[in-house]
Every structure is written in structure tokens, then in C-alpha cells.
Image: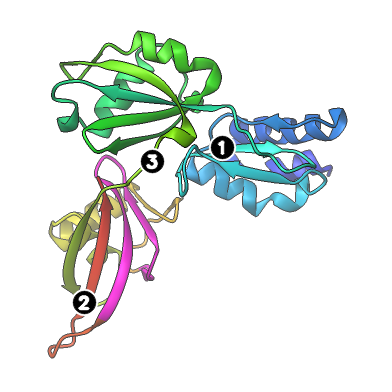
Amino acid sequence: MNNREKFLAQAGEDREALARVFDKAAAAEKKGIAMFTSFLSEREFMLVCERKKNIDSVPFTAFGGYEDAGRVMLCFSVDDCEYFPIKAVRVMGKGVENLNHPDLLGSIISTGLERKSIGDIVKNGSEWVVFCEEGVADYLADSLTEVGGCYVKCAVSEVFDIEVSLQFEEITGTVNSLRADSVVSVMLKTSRSKAQEYIEAQRFFLNQQLCTKCDKEIRENDILTVRHHGKARLSEISGMSKKGRIFITIKKYM
């Protein structure tokens, strides 16, 4: 089995994305020039890191337009990669601060752009910032005129001119144990039985991997995602109450 086959082994639904990554690495090695991938989801990036030994001939660096970005682009190069072809599109207008991530993503995809050309979409103060491939930035800025019933105007900026300040909702609570269903119930402010429904329906991801076990133990700094209900991090486990319940703090991405 060659390295490409090993890299793509048991990739499942991620095979196409991983194949593109491997081909970029191979091209960088063959041509001796820097090669960039499209944006990878957090899960795709995790899978690449797990299979890194099969593309070790060319080192890579990852960047998504700002520190701690979720979706990242990879640069395969033997030299340090100081520039990534990423631009920031600022989305502004009256009522924009009341929009949400699905509103923005849906409107962006309706312009005809592929998801892989779009990085993170983050709320930044009274505006939104869309990180995207350099080649589609002007098209996106010109095409995105309305989002969720709001008329918007867009401006293309260099990523280093944007200072991203991620916003979180801090949620505190107590649980009998650090089981997934208990922690998810605090995250979503819902009942444990409802949390169990989400997990058993294959809508829960732990550190970007599908988790269907309600009794899976959650650890500090684990990333929790419930499809269509948001993403959060278990930021702190802070002791126990007199009744033996565990205090937890969750930071949910807004």
C-alpha cells in the first residue's frame, strides 16, 4: 500500500477532502513550491494531523485568518510560509448584529460559492467577518447584498488588519457526573433526556468526532458540538458541592 492509499484508508465521507490535501502535498514535493489547500473543517484538519506520517516528506503549516480559527488552510512548503491567500470580508449594515451564523452561511452559499472556499464566519462587535480564499473575496463582497432580510454592504480587508474578538456565552451549572448527556444538558439549558435524544440521533460531536455514547466522560477543554444547536468548550471543572454535584463552566460560541 502506497502512502496515498494509507493516507486515504477508511476516510469515508472525508475521502474527497483528504485526497485534495494529499495531492497538494505531492505537488509541493514534486514542484518544490508552496501549495495551499482550500479551507478544511476542524474534523478534516484533525484527520490530516492523525495521518501526518504519510505526508511527512513536505511539512505544513495551518492558518485560518486569525489565531485559533476553526477552519484552516494548509500550506505545504519546505520554507516558512509567511503569507496565506486569505482575505477578510467585513459584513456591515443596519441590523447585522442581530443575524446569526446560519443566516450568513446560507446567504454566502446562495451566491454560488463552495463551502471549502469559506473559512470561519465570526461576529466581531457590530459587524460580521467572513474569512475566505483570496480569489473569491471581491466576488463575495459584490454578491452579498442581503442577509436574513437585512441589506448589507461588504468591504474586503487584509486579515492582519482585522482584530477578532470571539464572543462567548458563559454557562455555569452542576452535574452529578461528567457524562456527555449531563454536560450537554447544561450546555443547551435543556433536560438530560433531551440531551440523550440529540446524542442518540448522532447529532453530537466531541472534539470534532461523532459521539453516540451518552455515558462518554467529558474532560476539561473538550469541544462539544450539537448539530444545529451550537458549539462550546468545557472551560472549567471547579470542585463539588456539599451534595456531591460537580460545578462546571461552559463557554458557548456565539
Q: Nearer the viewer, mark 3 or mark 1?
A: 3
What residue would you read off at disc 1?
14
Judged left or right of residue 191, residue 183 is: right
* Quarter assignment of residue 50: bottom right
Q: Is mark 2 on a helix, strand or loop?
A: strand
The residue that label 3 is drawn on is 163
Separation of disc 2 and disc 1 at Cα? 37 Å
Q: Write down the region rendered in magenta.
A: 216-238
Q: Along the horizontal axis of the image, is 28 left or right of 218?
A: right
Three-letter code, disc 3: Glu
Q: What crowding class fits label 3: few (fewer than 14 Cα within 10 Å), some (14-19), or many (20 or more)?
A: few
User: Split into 4 quadrants, where in the image is the C terminus?
Assistant: top left
Place residue 126 in its image quadrant. Answer: top left
Residue that badge 2 annotates: 247
Q: Is mark 3 on a helix, strand or loop?
A: loop
- The residue depicted at 86 percent of the width and 30 percent of the height is 30
Q: Can residue 178 be seen in this view?
A: no
Q: Residue at left 45%, top 50%?
A: 208
Q: What residue type is labelled 2?
A: Phe
**Residue 222 placed where, x, y %?**
40, 63
* Residue 224 highlighted magenta (yes or no): yes
Asked if the magenta segment contains residue 219, the reply would be yes
Q: Is residue 209 above or below residue 75?
A: below
Query: In the rendered image of this protein, does residue 21 appear above or below residue 236?
Result: above
- In space, the residues marked 3 and 2 are separated at their CA atoms by 33 Å
